[in-house]
Image: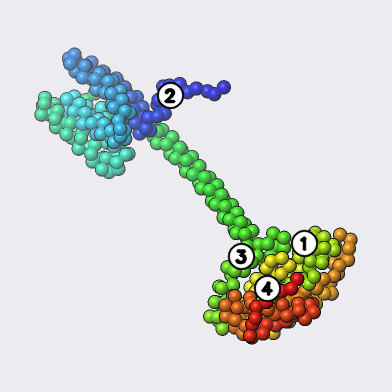
Amino acid sequence: MALQTHPAVASMREVHWVVRMNYRGRTVSWGMIFAVCVLLGQERAWSWGHWVALVLQFVAYPQLSYLLARHSAEPVRSELRILTLDSFCFGLWMSWMGAPLWLAYALCACGAMTLAAFRGMGGLYQAVLAQASGALCGVLLWGFEFRPDMGPASTALSMASLTTYLWIFAHAVNVRTHRLNRIRWQLKDSERALQQQLLEISALQSQLREQANRDALTGLFNRRFLDATMDRELARCQRMAEPLSLILIDIDHFKNINDTFGHAAGDEVLRRLAFLLSTDARSSDVVCRHGGEEFLLMLPHMPLAVAMARAERYRSMLESSVMLIEGKRMRCTLSAGVACYPVHGKGPSELMAAADSALYRAKRTGRNRIERAAEDLSTKSVPA
Protein backbone atom coordinates (compact mmCIF):
# COMPACT_ATOMS: atom_id res chain seq x y z
CA MET A 1 0.00 0.00 0.00
CA ALA A 2 1.36 3.42 -0.96
CA LEU A 3 2.02 5.81 1.91
CA GLN A 4 0.04 9.03 1.79
CA THR A 5 1.68 12.30 2.72
CA HIS A 6 -0.18 14.48 5.20
CA PRO A 7 -1.72 17.51 3.38
CA ALA A 8 0.06 19.95 5.68
CA VAL A 9 3.44 18.35 4.98
CA ALA A 10 2.77 18.24 1.24
CA SER A 11 1.78 21.89 1.34
CA MET A 12 5.04 22.84 3.08
CA ARG A 13 7.03 20.97 0.45
CA GLU A 14 5.42 23.03 -2.26
CA VAL A 15 6.56 26.29 -0.65
CA HIS A 16 9.80 27.79 -1.98
CA TRP A 17 12.71 26.92 0.30
CA VAL A 18 13.63 30.61 0.83
CA VAL A 19 10.13 31.40 2.10
CA ARG A 20 10.05 28.24 4.22
CA MET A 21 13.46 28.88 5.78
CA ASN A 22 12.72 32.51 6.67
CA TYR A 23 9.31 31.59 8.04
CA ARG A 24 10.84 29.11 10.46
CA GLY A 25 13.57 31.50 11.53
CA ARG A 26 11.15 34.43 11.87
CA THR A 27 8.59 32.44 13.86
CA VAL A 28 11.02 30.99 16.40
CA SER A 29 13.34 33.97 16.89
CA TRP A 30 10.55 36.53 16.85
CA GLY A 31 8.70 34.47 19.43
CA MET A 32 11.70 34.82 21.70
CA ILE A 33 11.95 38.55 20.90
CA PHE A 34 8.28 38.81 21.84
CA ALA A 35 9.13 37.29 25.21
CA VAL A 36 11.96 39.82 25.64
CA CYS A 37 9.59 42.68 24.84
CA VAL A 38 7.06 41.32 27.35
CA LEU A 39 9.70 41.45 30.08
CA LEU A 40 10.78 44.91 28.97
CA GLY A 41 7.18 46.12 28.82
CA GLN A 42 6.55 44.92 32.33
CA GLU A 43 9.65 46.77 33.49
CA ARG A 44 8.51 49.95 31.78
CA ALA A 45 4.74 49.67 32.40
CA TRP A 46 3.53 49.88 28.78
CA SER A 47 0.00 50.94 27.92
CA TRP A 48 -2.50 48.57 26.31
CA GLY A 49 -1.86 50.13 22.88
CA HIS A 50 1.79 49.17 23.06
CA TRP A 51 0.81 45.57 23.90
CA VAL A 52 -1.55 45.41 20.91
CA ALA A 53 1.19 46.73 18.60
CA LEU A 54 3.61 44.19 20.07
CA VAL A 55 1.25 41.26 19.39
CA LEU A 56 0.56 42.45 15.85
CA GLN A 57 4.26 42.87 15.07
CA PHE A 58 5.80 39.76 16.60
CA VAL A 59 2.92 37.27 16.55
CA ALA A 60 0.55 38.14 13.69
CA TYR A 61 3.05 39.70 11.28
CA PRO A 62 5.21 36.54 10.75
CA GLN A 63 2.10 34.52 9.81
CA LEU A 64 0.72 37.18 7.48
CA SER A 65 4.08 37.73 5.76
CA TYR A 66 4.44 33.97 5.23
CA LEU A 67 1.01 33.70 3.61
CA LEU A 68 1.76 36.71 1.43
CA ALA A 69 5.08 35.32 0.18
CA ARG A 70 3.76 31.78 -0.21
CA HIS A 71 0.87 32.78 -2.45
CA SER A 72 2.81 35.38 -4.40
CA ALA A 73 3.47 34.86 -8.11
CA GLU A 74 7.16 35.58 -7.33
CA PRO A 75 7.69 34.18 -3.81
CA VAL A 76 11.42 34.93 -3.55
CA ARG A 77 11.08 38.55 -4.63
CA SER A 78 8.12 38.97 -2.29
CA GLU A 79 10.11 37.43 0.60
CA LEU A 80 13.03 39.81 0.00
CA ARG A 81 10.65 42.77 0.14
CA ILE A 82 9.29 41.44 3.43
CA LEU A 83 12.83 41.14 4.81
CA THR A 84 13.39 44.80 3.97
CA LEU A 85 10.15 45.65 5.74
CA ASP A 86 11.36 43.63 8.74
CA SER A 87 14.43 45.85 9.02
CA PHE A 88 12.30 48.99 8.75
CA CYS A 89 10.04 47.75 11.57
CA PHE A 90 13.06 46.89 13.71
CA GLY A 91 14.31 50.47 13.37
CA LEU A 92 10.87 51.80 14.25
CA TRP A 93 10.64 49.65 17.39
CA MET A 94 14.17 50.45 18.51
CA SER A 95 13.45 54.15 18.19
CA TRP A 96 10.24 53.84 20.18
CA MET A 97 11.82 51.70 22.94
CA GLY A 98 14.86 53.95 23.29
CA ALA A 99 17.32 51.49 21.68
CA PRO A 100 17.70 48.93 24.50
CA LEU A 101 21.20 47.67 23.84
CA TRP A 102 20.97 43.87 23.49
CA LEU A 103 17.50 43.87 21.97
CA ALA A 104 18.47 46.50 19.38
CA TYR A 105 21.63 44.58 18.56
CA ALA A 106 19.78 41.28 18.17
CA LEU A 107 17.08 42.69 15.89
CA CYS A 108 19.37 44.80 13.72
CA ALA A 109 22.02 42.08 13.39
CA CYS A 110 19.45 39.43 12.38
CA GLY A 111 17.79 41.71 9.84
CA ALA A 112 21.08 42.80 8.26
CA MET A 113 22.53 39.28 8.17
CA THR A 114 19.45 37.75 6.51
CA LEU A 115 19.34 40.29 3.68
CA ALA A 116 23.11 40.06 3.23
CA ALA A 117 22.82 36.27 2.89
CA PHE A 118 20.53 36.64 -0.13
CA ARG A 119 21.81 39.85 -1.70
CA GLY A 120 25.43 40.14 -0.56
CA MET A 121 26.82 43.53 0.42
CA GLY A 122 23.95 45.21 -1.39
CA GLY A 123 21.55 43.44 0.98
CA LEU A 124 23.57 44.58 3.99
CA TYR A 125 23.42 48.21 2.85
CA GLN A 126 19.70 47.84 2.13
CA ALA A 127 19.03 46.46 5.64
CA VAL A 128 21.02 49.22 7.33
CA LEU A 129 19.22 51.87 5.27
CA ALA A 130 15.80 50.36 6.10
CA GLN A 131 16.63 50.24 9.82
CA ALA A 132 17.86 53.81 9.78
CA SER A 133 14.70 54.91 7.92
CA GLY A 134 12.51 53.16 10.51
CA ALA A 135 14.41 54.76 13.37
CA LEU A 136 14.12 58.20 11.76
CA CYS A 137 10.36 57.78 11.30
CA GLY A 138 10.05 56.78 14.95
CA VAL A 139 11.98 59.86 16.05
CA LEU A 140 9.75 62.09 13.92
CA LEU A 141 6.57 60.46 15.30
CA TRP A 142 7.25 60.38 19.02
CA GLY A 143 10.72 61.80 19.58
CA PHE A 144 13.65 59.87 20.99
CA GLU A 145 14.68 58.91 24.50
CA PHE A 146 17.85 56.85 24.81
CA ARG A 147 17.22 53.99 27.28
CA PRO A 148 19.87 51.30 26.65
CA ASP A 149 19.60 49.53 30.00
CA MET A 150 17.73 46.23 30.26
CA GLY A 151 17.08 43.87 33.12
CA PRO A 152 19.15 40.67 33.50
CA ALA A 153 16.30 38.42 32.32
CA SER A 154 15.49 40.44 29.19
CA THR A 155 19.21 40.79 28.39
CA ALA A 156 19.80 37.05 28.69
CA LEU A 157 16.72 36.28 26.60
CA SER A 158 17.88 38.75 23.91
CA MET A 159 21.20 36.97 23.71
CA ALA A 160 19.43 33.61 23.58
CA SER A 161 17.11 34.79 20.80
CA LEU A 162 20.08 35.98 18.71
CA THR A 163 21.90 32.69 19.29
CA THR A 164 18.79 30.70 18.37
CA TYR A 165 18.28 32.65 15.17
CA LEU A 166 21.92 32.16 14.18
CA TRP A 167 21.60 28.41 14.84
CA ILE A 168 18.40 28.16 12.80
CA PHE A 169 19.98 30.09 9.96
CA ALA A 170 23.19 28.02 10.06
CA HIS A 171 21.20 24.77 10.19
CA ALA A 172 19.10 25.81 7.19
CA VAL A 173 22.23 26.71 5.23
CA ASN A 174 23.84 23.39 6.18
CA VAL A 175 20.78 21.41 5.09
CA ARG A 176 20.64 23.34 1.84
CA THR A 177 24.36 22.78 1.22
CA HIS A 178 24.02 19.02 1.75
CA ARG A 179 21.01 18.93 -0.53
CA LEU A 180 22.86 20.83 -3.25
CA ASN A 181 25.82 18.47 -2.88
CA ARG A 182 23.51 15.47 -3.29
CA ILE A 183 21.96 17.07 -6.36
CA ARG A 184 25.44 17.84 -7.72
CA TRP A 185 26.53 14.22 -7.28
CA GLN A 186 23.30 13.00 -8.82
CA LEU A 187 23.90 15.29 -11.79
CA LYS A 188 27.45 13.96 -12.10
CA ASP A 189 26.14 10.39 -12.00
CA SER A 190 23.51 11.30 -14.59
CA GLU A 191 26.17 12.98 -16.72
CA ARG A 192 28.40 9.90 -16.53
CA ALA A 193 25.44 7.67 -17.41
CA LEU A 194 24.55 9.98 -20.30
CA GLN A 195 28.15 9.96 -21.55
CA GLN A 196 28.16 6.18 -21.35
CA GLN A 197 24.91 6.06 -23.32
CA LEU A 198 26.35 8.45 -25.89
CA LEU A 199 29.44 6.24 -26.21
CA GLU A 200 27.23 3.19 -26.62
CA ILE A 201 25.10 4.98 -29.19
CA SER A 202 28.22 6.14 -31.03
CA ALA A 203 29.60 2.59 -30.98
CA LEU A 204 26.25 1.26 -32.20
CA GLN A 205 26.18 3.83 -34.98
CA SER A 206 29.73 2.86 -35.98
CA GLN A 207 28.68 -0.78 -35.90
CA LEU A 208 25.65 -0.05 -38.06
CA ARG A 209 27.77 1.93 -40.51
CA GLU A 210 30.26 -0.92 -40.56
CA GLN A 211 27.50 -3.45 -41.17
CA ALA A 212 26.07 -1.28 -43.94
CA ASN A 213 29.51 -1.29 -45.62
CA ARG A 214 30.25 -5.00 -45.10
CA ASP A 215 29.19 -8.12 -46.94
CA ALA A 216 27.29 -10.36 -44.53
CA LEU A 217 28.72 -13.64 -45.84
CA THR A 218 32.43 -12.85 -46.17
CA GLY A 219 32.90 -9.84 -43.87
CA LEU A 220 34.61 -7.94 -46.68
CA PHE A 221 33.64 -4.46 -47.79
CA ASN A 222 30.72 -4.35 -50.21
CA ARG A 223 30.28 -2.53 -53.50
CA ARG A 224 28.58 0.39 -51.77
CA PHE A 225 31.69 1.10 -49.74
CA LEU A 226 33.89 0.75 -52.82
CA ASP A 227 31.84 3.26 -54.78
CA ALA A 228 32.05 5.74 -51.89
CA THR A 229 35.81 5.26 -51.50
CA MET A 230 37.26 5.01 -55.00
CA ASP A 231 36.78 8.67 -55.99
CA ARG A 232 38.57 9.80 -52.84
CA GLU A 233 41.47 7.39 -53.28
CA LEU A 234 41.88 8.30 -56.95
CA ALA A 235 41.96 12.01 -56.06
CA ARG A 236 44.62 11.35 -53.42
CA CYS A 237 46.79 9.33 -55.82
CA GLN A 238 46.39 12.06 -58.44
CA ARG A 239 47.59 14.73 -55.98
CA MET A 240 50.57 12.59 -54.99
CA ALA A 241 51.29 11.48 -58.59
CA GLU A 242 51.15 7.83 -57.55
CA PRO A 243 49.44 4.82 -59.19
CA LEU A 244 46.33 2.97 -58.04
CA SER A 245 45.68 -0.59 -59.17
CA LEU A 246 42.51 -2.65 -59.34
CA ILE A 247 42.37 -6.48 -59.29
CA LEU A 248 39.03 -7.93 -60.34
CA ILE A 249 38.79 -11.65 -59.40
CA ASP A 250 36.24 -14.25 -60.42
CA ILE A 251 36.05 -17.87 -59.18
CA ASP A 252 36.17 -20.24 -62.13
CA HIS A 253 33.16 -22.49 -62.74
CA PHE A 254 31.48 -21.33 -59.53
CA LYS A 255 28.07 -22.42 -60.79
CA ASN A 256 29.36 -25.97 -61.13
CA ILE A 257 30.61 -25.86 -57.54
CA ASN A 258 27.13 -24.91 -56.32
CA ASP A 259 25.47 -27.54 -58.50
CA THR A 260 27.89 -30.32 -57.51
CA PHE A 261 28.59 -29.67 -53.84
CA GLY A 262 25.65 -27.45 -52.87
CA HIS A 263 25.25 -23.80 -52.02
CA ALA A 264 26.69 -24.29 -48.52
CA ALA A 265 29.92 -25.45 -50.12
CA GLY A 266 29.81 -22.48 -52.49
CA ASP A 267 29.45 -20.12 -49.54
CA GLU A 268 32.41 -21.76 -47.83
CA VAL A 269 34.55 -21.30 -50.95
CA LEU A 270 33.64 -17.59 -50.96
CA ARG A 271 34.62 -17.29 -47.30
CA ARG A 272 37.94 -19.12 -47.85
CA LEU A 273 38.88 -16.86 -50.75
CA ALA A 274 37.83 -13.76 -48.77
CA PHE A 275 40.11 -14.86 -45.94
CA LEU A 276 42.99 -15.42 -48.38
CA LEU A 277 42.59 -11.97 -49.93
CA SER A 278 42.20 -10.06 -46.65
CA THR A 279 45.10 -11.67 -44.78
CA ASP A 280 47.55 -10.59 -47.47
CA ALA A 281 46.21 -7.02 -47.74
CA ARG A 282 47.87 -3.81 -46.55
CA SER A 283 46.07 -1.41 -44.24
CA SER A 284 45.50 0.98 -47.15
CA ASP A 285 44.05 -1.72 -49.44
CA VAL A 286 40.30 -2.11 -49.91
CA VAL A 287 39.16 -5.71 -50.37
CA CYS A 288 35.52 -6.09 -51.27
CA ARG A 289 33.05 -8.61 -52.54
CA HIS A 290 31.96 -7.07 -55.79
CA GLY A 291 28.97 -9.31 -56.29
CA GLY A 292 28.25 -13.03 -56.64
CA GLU A 293 31.58 -14.83 -57.00
CA GLU A 294 33.50 -11.65 -57.94
CA PHE A 295 35.97 -9.90 -55.64
CA LEU A 296 37.72 -6.60 -56.21
CA LEU A 297 40.87 -5.23 -54.63
CA MET A 298 41.64 -1.50 -54.75
CA LEU A 299 45.35 -1.00 -54.12
CA PRO A 300 46.41 2.66 -53.65
CA HIS A 301 50.05 3.57 -54.40
CA MET A 302 50.68 0.17 -56.05
CA PRO A 303 52.13 0.07 -59.60
CA LEU A 304 50.83 -2.31 -62.23
CA ALA A 305 53.71 -4.79 -62.08
CA VAL A 306 53.36 -5.25 -58.31
CA ALA A 307 49.60 -5.66 -58.66
CA MET A 308 50.12 -8.33 -61.35
CA ALA A 309 52.49 -10.19 -59.01
CA ARG A 310 49.97 -9.92 -56.18
CA ALA A 311 47.18 -11.31 -58.36
CA GLU A 312 49.40 -14.18 -59.54
CA ARG A 313 50.21 -15.06 -55.93
CA TYR A 314 46.49 -15.24 -55.12
CA ARG A 315 45.91 -17.47 -58.17
CA SER A 316 48.76 -19.81 -57.27
CA MET A 317 47.75 -20.09 -53.60
CA LEU A 318 44.13 -20.92 -54.43
CA GLU A 319 45.10 -23.42 -57.14
CA SER A 320 47.46 -25.29 -54.80
CA SER A 321 45.08 -25.43 -51.85
CA VAL A 322 42.76 -28.35 -51.18
CA MET A 323 39.52 -27.51 -49.39
CA LEU A 324 37.83 -30.09 -47.19
CA ILE A 325 34.18 -29.13 -47.06
CA GLU A 326 31.71 -31.43 -45.30
CA GLY A 327 34.10 -34.35 -45.73
CA LYS A 328 34.63 -33.69 -49.44
CA ARG A 329 37.98 -32.69 -50.96
CA MET A 330 37.66 -29.89 -53.48
CA ARG A 331 39.92 -27.67 -55.54
CA CYS A 332 39.04 -24.45 -57.33
CA THR A 333 40.79 -21.75 -59.33
CA LEU A 334 40.36 -18.09 -60.08
CA SER A 335 40.80 -15.71 -62.98
CA ALA A 336 41.67 -12.03 -62.57
CA GLY A 337 41.97 -8.83 -64.54
CA VAL A 338 44.31 -6.04 -63.45
CA ALA A 339 44.07 -2.35 -64.36
CA CYS A 340 46.09 0.62 -63.12
CA TYR A 341 45.65 4.38 -62.86
CA PRO A 342 46.62 6.38 -64.88
CA VAL A 343 47.63 3.87 -67.60
CA HIS A 344 44.19 2.36 -68.13
CA GLY A 345 41.94 5.24 -67.12
CA LYS A 346 41.61 8.29 -64.90
CA GLY A 347 38.14 7.73 -63.47
CA PRO A 348 36.44 4.89 -61.56
CA SER A 349 34.27 3.79 -64.48
CA GLU A 350 37.24 3.67 -66.88
CA LEU A 351 39.36 1.64 -64.49
CA MET A 352 36.52 -0.75 -63.70
CA ALA A 353 35.86 -1.26 -67.41
CA ALA A 354 39.54 -1.94 -67.99
CA ALA A 355 39.75 -4.51 -65.19
CA ASP A 356 36.50 -6.14 -66.35
CA SER A 357 37.83 -6.38 -69.92
CA ALA A 358 41.03 -7.99 -68.66
CA LEU A 359 39.03 -10.46 -66.58
CA TYR A 360 36.92 -11.34 -69.63
CA ARG A 361 40.06 -12.04 -71.59
CA ALA A 362 41.41 -14.29 -68.83
CA LYS A 363 38.14 -16.24 -68.83
CA ARG A 364 38.01 -16.47 -72.59
CA THR A 365 41.59 -17.73 -72.94
CA GLY A 366 41.25 -20.70 -70.60
CA ARG A 367 40.62 -19.42 -67.02
CA ASN A 368 42.97 -19.89 -64.04
CA ARG A 369 45.10 -17.02 -65.32
CA ILE A 370 45.84 -13.32 -64.80
CA GLU A 371 45.50 -10.69 -67.53
CA ARG A 372 46.44 -7.02 -67.53
CA ALA A 373 44.15 -4.45 -69.14
CA ALA A 374 44.87 -3.19 -72.62
CA GLU A 375 45.18 0.51 -73.22
CA ASP A 376 42.39 0.56 -75.81
CA LEU A 377 39.38 -0.81 -73.97
CA SER A 378 36.19 -2.48 -75.10
CA THR A 379 33.78 -3.37 -72.36
CA LYS A 380 32.44 -6.93 -72.50
CA SER A 381 30.54 -9.23 -70.19
CA VAL A 382 32.34 -11.99 -68.33
CA PRO A 383 31.15 -15.46 -69.40
CA ALA A 384 29.77 -17.68 -66.70
Q: Nearer the viewer, mark 2 or mark 3?
A: 3
Q: Crowding at label 3, few (<14), some or many (≥20) Cα neighbours within 10 Å?
A: some
Q: Nearer the viewer, mark 4 or mark 2?
A: 4
Residue 372 in the image, given as x and y percentages of width and height: 70, 83
Which disc is residue 361 wearing? Answer: none
| Residue at the disc numbered 4 | 297
Question: Residue at (53%, 48%) from the top-left corner?
Answer: 194
Of 99 and 110, nearer the camera is 110
Q: Is residue 378 above or below residue 225?
A: below
Q: Earlier in the sequence, mark 1 or mark 3?
A: 3
Q: Earlier in the sequence, mark 4 or mark 2?
A: 2
Q: Quadrant of the C terminus?
A: bottom right
Q: Quadrant of the N terminus?
A: top right
Q: Amino acid at mark 3?
A: Arg
Question: Residue at (21%, 16%) from the top-left corner?
Answer: 52
| Residue at the disc numbered 1 | 267
Q: Disc 4 and disc 2: Cα gap in Å?
A: 74 Å
Q: Amino acid at mark 4?
A: Leu
Q: Disc 4 and disc 3: Cα gap in Å?
A: 14 Å
Q: Disc 2 and disc 3: Cα gap in Å?
A: 65 Å
Q: Earlier in the sequence, mark 1 or mark 2?
A: 2
Which disc is residue 9 wearing? Answer: 2
Q: Is residue 283 visible?
A: no
Question: Residue at (23%, 31%) from the top-left corner?
Answer: 85
Q: Earlier in the sequence, mark 2 or mark 3?
A: 2
Figure coloring: rainbow
